[in-house]
Amino acid sequence: MKKKALILGIESSCDETAAAVLEESNESIPNLLSNIVSSQEEVHKRFGGVVPELAARSHVDKIDLIVDEALKKSQRQLKDIDAIAVTGGPGLIVCLSVGLNFAKALAISLKKPLIVVNHLEGHALSPKLVTEIKYPYLLLLISGGHSQYLAVKNLGKYKRLGTTIDDAVGEAFDKTAKLLGIKFPGGPLIEKFATRGNKNRFNLPKPIINKGGCNLSFAGLKTAVLKISKTLRNNQDKYDLAASFQKTIEEILNKKTKIAFNQFKKISQKKNNYFVIAGGVAANDNIRNNLKKLSFDENFVPIFPPQNLCGDNAAMIAMVGLEKFKLKKFSKLDYPAKPRWPLDKKAAFLKGAGVKL
């Protein structure tokens, strides 16, 4: 009987130290034996954001303990592992280097293949951990560092349909939370504040809403929130601004997603299309519900990873690792960390002043 491949996944691209063990299955969905994520919230809270050097030190302190915990929970041993999959980028280079060097050392000592994974590809394939999905499908990746619409054609084959030309939507959530006095990481709490507020109180801008295809922009929205935040007098004002911000984000994503749907239909030419929404912001219930409704209205099947798999985790890295292991797509031991690593290498760089849409 053929041995089922066993992949150890490692993630350290930003401020989560994570490890997971994934086992190949006879079914289409693999067996996730463990998925351990150690957050650094307490480390960065007093600074109001992630401090790269502190994040890297925390990874160094924890990574061996997290890998050990993942192995113990999976009831497997290091000698059972067939390959080590690790995030190689994009991300903070000092953080990426910790996980990458640890994985390289393991690969050398165990004499097992190293598989370096694009963090964004991990998000793209994360639904495969829980559901059967066939290529091609449309992906909306919304997180603290990324906001993109991608046509996922196959493993390693992506076409970018739209991207943010400035800030990521998750960053806009975090900065708005900070202006409202919510401690880091405050982005997820915006939704709770919004439930107490009047979403029609403040008329906030929707940058490039009527141009640029399904490209996105959030810098102007952040600036508007900053100006209004200086006039707030009480908690109700804060709740109203949070509600207005949440509503504005939903409206932007709805409008741009409709455009992405039309673009993707020309690529897939199928009657029934899949729409995957991944990344940390995909855990926002209101955004999930709005995009679900829009998907059904436009004949797309919406697929969300479970909320525990929306943020950064090693299970999604192991998922890509398993797919590459089957194809024997291994990495050299001198593979460098890549702080910038686009999935669609042919897509134009669309950030900075003077960008033409």
Image (tube, rainbow, N blue to C red):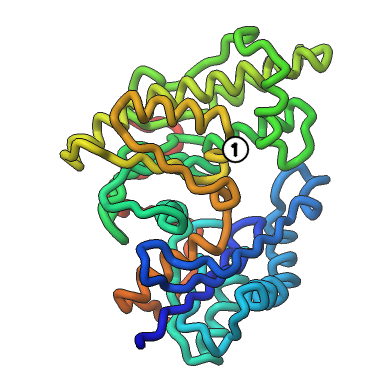
Q: Is residue 172 above or below residue 250?
A: below
Kind of residue indicated by mark 1: Glu
Q: Quadrant of residue 198?
A: top right
Left or right: residue 127 compared with residue 199: left
The number of numbered badges drawn on the structure is 1
Where 207 sits versus 23, above or below? above
x, y percent for residue 225: 64, 20
Front-most of residues 88 and 138: 138
SS state under label 1? helix
Residue 97 visible in the snapshot = no
Q: Is residue 77 visible?
A: yes
Q: Position of residue 237 (x, y in %)?
A: 76, 13
Q: Position of residue 31 (x, y in %)?
A: 48, 67
The residue carrying mark 1 is 171
Q: Where is residue 341 drawn, in percent x and y? A: 42, 57
| Residue in the picture at 20% in, 42% down | 268
**In which quarter of the view is residue 46 placed?**
top right
Q: Nearer the viewer, residue 238 or 324?
A: 324
Give the crowd class for mark 1: few <14, some 14-19, many >=20 residues within 10 Å: many
Asked if residue 184 is positioned above or below residue 339 in the image, the reply reads above
Give the side of residue 334 with respect to residue 169, left or right: left
- 25 in relation to 244, above or below: below
Which quadrant: the C terminus?
Answer: top left
* Residue at image point 28% right, 53% down: 134
Quadrant for the N terminus, please.
bottom left
What residue sits 33% from the left and 26% below the top? Answer: 258
Residue in the image at 43% along x and 31% along y? 292
Q: Nearer the viewer, residue 67 or 52?
A: 67
